[in-house]
Image (spheres, rainbow, N blue to C red):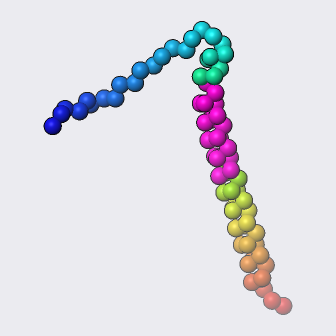
Amino acid sequence: MARRPDRIRIEVFAPNNSAETAEQALRPSDDAIRSLARLIGRQMAREQFERACALERKQARQNRSGPMR
């Protein structure tokens, strides 16, 4: 059996001095960050909406089961 390396080697290449190349190199990470932020924002909005609906249901139940005269 061949010995497996304990670590993974990652090579990092410096971008060219061109501003356009640096901008293009950052674009995929910017897109990924925006997508992640959008997903997080949607999840937060969904949770907030669910809490508001649960509160409305709770208040409606309390109003229905209030004292009868």
**Rendered view: 8 above or below 54:** above
Q: Residue furthest bottom?
A: 69
What residue is shown at x 34% (from left), y 29% (from top)? 8
Q: Residue furthest right?
A: 69
Q: Considering the whole magenta stretch, tell me its main secondary structure.
A: helix
Q: Quadrant of residue 18?
A: top right
**Quarter of the rendering occupied by the C terminus:** bottom right
In reply to whether residue 40 is colored magenta, the answer given is yes
Q: Residue furthest top?
A: 17
> Which of the pair 21/8 is nearer the observer?
21
Q: Give the percent coordinates (x, y) of residue 26.
A: 61, 24
Q: Quadrant of residue 1?
A: top left
Q: Give the percent coordinates (x, y) of residue 11.
A: 41, 20
Q: Quadrant of residue 67?
A: bottom right
Q: Is 7 positioned to the left or the right of 37 in the image?
A: left
Q: Give the percent coordinates (x, y) of residue 25.
A: 59, 22
Q: Give the percent coordinates (x, y) of residue 31.
A: 64, 34
In reply to whether residue 19 is colored magenta, the answer given is no
Q: Is 56 positioned to the left or the right of 40 in the image?
A: right
What residue is shown at x 68% (from left), y 46% (from top)? 41
**Rendered view: 49 above or below 40:** below
What residue is shown at x 77% (from left), y 76% (from top)? 60
Which segment is the magenta one?
Answer: 26-43
> Which of the pair 24/49 is nearer the observer?
24
